[in-house]
């Protein structure tokens, strides 16, 4: 019993122990009395009930445990020695002040209560003591002794300190917090060096490897690990590990090994392409430790850049016939000990014939480095898995005849199938050494796969942009999205139609497959042929048909949503609206799409748009690039000689009317230079209806003097549209040239009476387009009279 005086009041605390006697029954109430006597007079009495409950072993997982019990059984003191501590039994208890309790504020006094019960011959004794603890928001104590300060060590993994192109490397951070200390905050900062604002190494993984067993109250989920790019949007080149508050509650004599008081982290870094990297360059990764309010430690781990290494690992897949086509060769997964290795490495696909079949796929893996520590019992940590997908072409079953098949016995049928096995060769190369190779034989099933069409494709037919209007004379892009059902194979044919009510007002310029999802790797839109036709049987194409054959979704049906880009085939339709007097502002036009599935199922879709006599502001507020190139650095001409100039126009994705006006210099009633010819050299495929530009190209020449001297030329391109999607496709990547229009013109030096030797003559190229705030650009070219 403990009694205290406070503010003229008496506080009494009693601890009642319910024995573990067999006579105590669970869930039964046991009563005890409380009485208060003063000077022999009882002024208060009451009874309190205790309900007996089974006491399980306390939860000692260090997660908010507030009770601990030690049962030593019988203890005997043999009395062999009689020094001061020989008769003591010490118990070390580690407890943590919980930050999550809102009532615990700075200065709060808390009590830790301990009780000891021991048996004697006639009765049990119970001793109860309390120890106060005061809560502080911040660390109140700094440790002056060196042995009480943290220790930081970096341990590089691997036999050498070399780092190779496109590989990773690993090191360990070991942070020791000595016994008997508490540090708050405790933060580690990991940074890689940069040159010209770009990191030389990136950090791709930081993880807790081990927490010493002496940190009884510290759980790994408390540690905050975050990565940052110091450039803002570049690779991760900084990591911060916030350990928050760390206490090592043991005494120094209780520590068995230093590793028991150590936090161990693993750090994985990766080579980054950088123009300033050179052979033998030293690259240091810095780790800083901030502890308490003023403590600071820093260490570096050094790597040496090794660029001249011939060892390259490759996965080579070949099909020695035209019946198998390779659809995919890629890294599928990498083990834990092969970090920083992206599975986005593109293989090189080779076709030996112009048949659209891929006969070889070479996956260059570069240099692979295992950054694991020591041996492991889990082989998956050291394993890299590649995925190879092949497609069986129609030619593989050209030998099959159903009538002849039915006349064969079962044995003969099996022998025929075995004679038609398809071969696939796979080799793993290290340098020029074939480390592993095998031939895989594929058995052909001559019967087409029957797909349950109860799950039909999901479809969407929409305009590429949200704008519902199209400028008269301009173009628009529409996407037909077909979501292929899981684990299905079927033949697909797509048909598109212009507005049948106005057969000469819409032109279908192009239909092509521009996207196939991840689960549909064997669909390559590069080799499909679209057939165009006219409802009026004239030159205006307003119908298109695209037969893509079999489409297979190789993903099993696991109940996932079908509407995902992984299951999507996107067919793009590009339509141009005619420029004539029969189209008025606000006129509505309809486009149709039909999907034929296995030749007997048909799905029909429609979409519409409206004509606009004005340009669409949201599609014209971009700035193209415009430049004139001459045939030589300095063009020198004599009277009657000619020279060619080129105009390069590069457009972002936009729609705009475009006119080019080229004007030559004159004086008096004659021209210094005359225009002899204008040619349209090229129009890239990002421009809608690009193949029509050449046949519609019609430059208009003019002479300001009404003579045979052409002093200017006007090229009206009408309304042009760069939709920017022609080559953004996994089998046909885009390039800057996809956005260019090239125009060239030839000029001639006239025999002008004012010509002077060495005279510099200028001519103007004026570009007119719809854009705010102006609408024109003028570039000046020139040559020197020789």
Image (tube, rainbow, N blue to C red):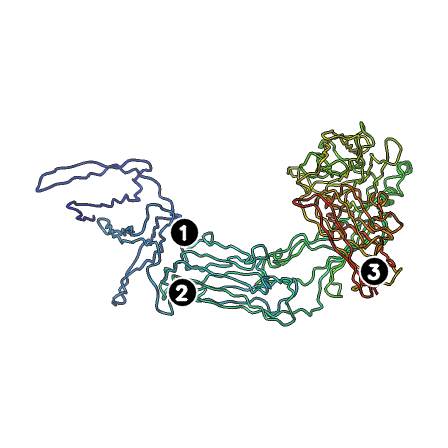
Q: Are marks 2 and 3 in contact (CB under 8 Å)?
A: no
Q: Decide which of tag 3 and tag 1 comes sooner along the chain.
A: 1
Residue matched to label 2: 295
Residue found 47% across the figure and 64% down from its top: 288
In front of the other: label 2 or label 3?
Answer: 3
How many neighbours does mark 1 have within 10 angstroms: few (below 14), some (14-19), or many (20 or more)?
A: some
Q: Say how many tags the image has.
A: 3
How many neighbours does mark 3 have within 10 angstroms: few (below 14), some (14-19), or many (20 or more)?
A: few
As helix, strand or loop, the secondary structure at mark 3 comes to: loop
View extreme (top): residue: 501
**In this view of the protein, which residue sits in the foreground, 10 or 546?**
546
Residue 256 seen from this side: no
As drawn, the label of residue 62 is: 1
Q: Decide which of tag 2 and tag 3 comes sooner along the chain.
A: 2
How many neighbours does mark 2 have within 10 angstroms: few (below 14), some (14-19), or many (20 or more)?
A: some
Residue matched to label 3: 754
Q: Which image quadrant is residue 638 in?
A: bottom right
Residue found 66% across the figure and 44% down from its top: 772
**In this view of the protein, which residue sits in the foreground, 524 or 323?**
524
x, y (%) of residue 65?
38, 48
Q: State left or right for residue 334 relative to residue 680.
A: left
């Amino acid at each position: 019993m403990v009694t205290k005086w406070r503010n003229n009041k008496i506080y009494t605390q009693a601890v009642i122990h319910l024995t573990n006697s067999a006579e105590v029954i669970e869930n039964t109430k046991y009563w005890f009395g409380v009485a208060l006597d003063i000077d022999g007079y009882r002024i208060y009495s009451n009874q309190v009930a205790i309900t007996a409950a089974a006491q399980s072993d306390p939860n000692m997982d260090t997660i908010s445990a507030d009770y601990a019990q030690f049962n030593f059984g019988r203890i005997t003191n043999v009395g062999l020695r009689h020094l001061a501590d020989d008769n003591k039994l010490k118990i070390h208890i580690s407890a943590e002040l919980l930050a999550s309790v809102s009532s615990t504020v700075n200065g709060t006094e808390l009590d830790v209560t301990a009780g000891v019960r021991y048996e004697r011959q006639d009765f049990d004794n119970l001793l109860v003591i309390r120890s106060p603890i005061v809560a502080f928001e911040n660390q109140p104590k700094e440790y002056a002794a060196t042995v009480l300060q943290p220790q930081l060590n970096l341990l590089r993994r691997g036999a050498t300190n070399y780092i190779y192109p496109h590989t990773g490397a690993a090191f360990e951070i070991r942070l020791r917090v000595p016994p008997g200390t508490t540090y708050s905050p405790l933060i580690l900062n990991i940074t890689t060096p940069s040159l010209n604002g770009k990191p030389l190494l990136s950090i791709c993984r930081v993880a807790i490897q081990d927490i010493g067993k002496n940190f009884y109250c510290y759980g790994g989920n408390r540690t905050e690990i975050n990565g940052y790019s110091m450039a803002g949007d570049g690779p991760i080149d900084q990591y911060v590990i916030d350990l928050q508050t760390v206490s090592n509650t043991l005494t120094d004599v209780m520590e068995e090994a230093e590793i028991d008081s150590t936090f161990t982290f693993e750090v994985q870094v990766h080579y980054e392409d950088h123009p300033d990297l050179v052979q033998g360059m030293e690259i240091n990764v810095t780790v800083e430790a901030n502890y308490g309010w003023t403590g600071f430690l820093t260490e570096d781990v050094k790597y040496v850049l090794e660029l001249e290494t011939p060892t390259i690992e490759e996965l080579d897949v070949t099909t020695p016939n035209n019946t198998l086509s390779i659809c995919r060769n890629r890294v599928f997964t990498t083990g834990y000990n092969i970090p920083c290795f992206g599975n986005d490495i593109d293989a090189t696909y080779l076709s030996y014939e112009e048949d659209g079949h891929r006969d070889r796929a070479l996956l260059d893996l570069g240099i692979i480095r295992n950054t694991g520590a020591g041996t492991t019992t889990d082989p998956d940590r050291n394993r890299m898995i590649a995925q190879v997908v092949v497609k069986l072409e129609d030619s593989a079953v050209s030998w099959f005849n159903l009538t002849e098949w039915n006349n064969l016995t079962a044995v003969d049928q099996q022998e025929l199938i075995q004679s038609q096995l398809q071969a696939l060769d796979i080799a793993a190369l290290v340098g020029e050494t074939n480390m592993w190779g095998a031939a895989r034989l594929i058995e052909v099933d001559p019967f087409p796969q029957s797909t349950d069409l109860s799950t039909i494709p999901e479809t969407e037919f929409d305009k590429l942009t949200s704008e519902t209007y199209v400028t008269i004379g301009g173009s628009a892009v529409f996407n037909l999205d077909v979501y292929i059902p899981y684990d299905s194979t079927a033949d697909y044919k797509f048909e598109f139609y212009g507005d049948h009510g106005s057969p000469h007002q819409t032109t279908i310029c192009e239909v092509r497959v521009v996207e196939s999802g991840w689960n549909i790797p064997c669909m390559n839109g590069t080799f499909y042929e679209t057939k165009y036709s006219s409802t009026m049987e004239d030159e205006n194409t307003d119908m298109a048909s695209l037969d893509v054959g079999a489409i297979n979704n190789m993903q099993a049906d696991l109940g996932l949503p079908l509407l995902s880009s992984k299951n999507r085939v996107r067919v793009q339709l590009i339509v141009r609206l005619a420029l004539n007097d029969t189209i008025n502002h606000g006129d509505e036009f309809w486009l149709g799409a039909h999907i034929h599935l296995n030749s007997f199922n048909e799905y029909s879709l429609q979409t519409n748009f409206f004509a606009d006599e004005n340009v669409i502001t949201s599609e014209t507020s971009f700035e193209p690039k415009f430049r004139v190139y001459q045939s030589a650095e300095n063009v020198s001409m004599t009277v009657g000689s000619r020279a060619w100039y080129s105009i390069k126009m590069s457009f972002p994705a936009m729609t705009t009317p475009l006119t080019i006006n080229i004007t030559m210099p004159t004086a008096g009633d004659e021209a210094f230079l005359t225009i002899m010819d204008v040619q349209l050299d090229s129009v890239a495929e990002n421009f809608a209806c690009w193949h029509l530009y050449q046949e519609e190209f019609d430059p208009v020449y003019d002479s300001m003097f009404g003579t045979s001297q052409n002093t200017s030329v006007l090229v009206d391109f009408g309304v042009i549209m760069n939709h920017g999607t022609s080559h953004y496709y996994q089998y046909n990547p885009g390039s800057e040239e996809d956005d260019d229009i090239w125009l060239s013109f030839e000029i001639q030096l006239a025999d002008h009476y004012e010509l002077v030797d060495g005279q510099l003559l200028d001519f103007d190229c004026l570009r007119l387009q719809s854009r705010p705030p102006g609408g024109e650009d003028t570039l000046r070219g020139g040559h020197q009279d020789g």
